[in-house]
Image (cartoon, helix red, strand yellow):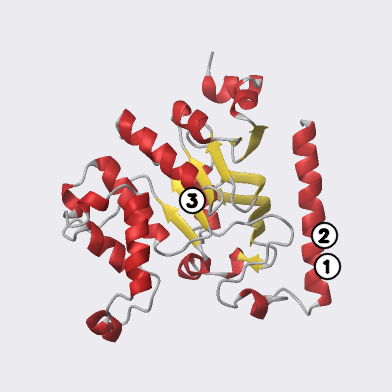
Amino acid sequence: MTPDLMEQGSERLQHKKEVDENKGSSGGRNAGYSRIHEPGALDLAHGRILYLEEVSVSFDGFRAINKLSLDIAPGELRCIIGPNGAGKTTMMDIITGKTRPDAGQVFFGSTIDLLRHSEAEIAGLGIGRKFQKPTVFEALTVFENLELALKSPRGVASALWHRLSGVQRDRLGEVLTLIQLSDQWQRPAGLLSHGQKQWLEIGMLLMQEPKLLLLDEPVAGMTDQETERTAELFLSLKGKHSLIVVEHDMSFIARISEIVTVLCEGAVLAQGTLAQVQADERVIEVYLGR
């Protein structure tokens, strides 16, 4: 194990100890629960927005995730790479509540135990996920897609009587500019290019005001120009949001990455800068090749 991973492991153990102490001193597992559910509140006292500790899950005897420990800082853009079957998608399934682990802890901020929440609740807490294939409403315009994604009540009555406020219109305009679709706002989503559909779906996630974004192979199938624009978009989001990007395109990873985590057989194999992990013999052997 490298010194960096040893230091990170020490930090995780200290975090775990402090979380456990908070539980014990405040009356159990729901300690701080009312505080964290104040609108917009997220306890980042430990300097981590996401924290996984010793997480494991098996499917029909196959261990897809094997004592995985990982933590993400607020505003960080973390890239995750690794061979097919390394556990990357299962990791995101666990974070978003789609899959329940057999063991381990998953915390959002210092106090929100994600294992106590459903998928819908986790999305409401501020975790957005984008799958590889874009999912947009193709018959609706770009603007209408973003409008539907607004973070606001969406019952039958509100759908019938809802009118955009000035603040909401400003936000829609900001997102349209950010995803570079301002000149396409009246265009049906079904007529967009593959890359533009990807950006629109990212824009729809941004309308939900997420604190953490999980992005699965976002540049797969894009042209070189679209890939470059996507890199610019992600770099502009960094700091305002935390991002976990799972991707195989190494030139794209080189463009956006600071810290790269390599998963293999459901656990962290290596972590560091892209240059560091590319030089790791274990990573070369199982993923990059010679």
Nearer the N terminus, badge 3 or badge 1?
Answer: 1
Q: Which quarter of the rendered picture does the N terminus lie within? A: top right
The amino acid pointed to by label 1 is Glu
The amino acid pointed to by label 2 is Lys
Nearer the N terminus, badge 2 or badge 3?
Answer: 2
Q: Element type at marker 1?
A: helix
Q: Which quadrant holds residue 22?
A: bottom right
Q: Which mark is residue 214?
A: 3
Image height of 225 relative to 94, above or below = above
Residue lying furthest top: 290
Q: Position of residue 39 (x, y in %)?
A: 55, 76
Pick whichever, 86 or 77, lies toward us: 77
Q: Position of residue 78 (x, y in %)?
A: 57, 42
Q: Is residue 205 left or right of residue 269?
A: left
Q: Position of residue 209 (x, y in %)?
A: 46, 63
Q: Would you call the spot at circle 3 few (<14 residues within 10 Å), some (14-19), or many (20 or more)?
A: many
* Residue found 65% across the figure and 38% down from its top: 268
Q: Nearer the viewer, mark 2 or mark 3?
A: 3
Q: Which residue is mark 2?
A: 17
The amino acid pointed to by label 3 is Leu
Disc 1, disc 2: CB below 8 Å? yes
Q: Which quarter of the rendered picture does the C terminus lie within? A: top right
* Residue found 83% across the figure and 75% down from its top: 25
Residue 220 seen from this side = no
Residue lying furthest bottom: 157
Q: Position of residue 113 (x, y in %)?
A: 64, 66
Q: Which residue is mark 1?
A: 21
Residue 4 seen from this side = yes
Pick whichever, 164 or 129, lies toward us: 164
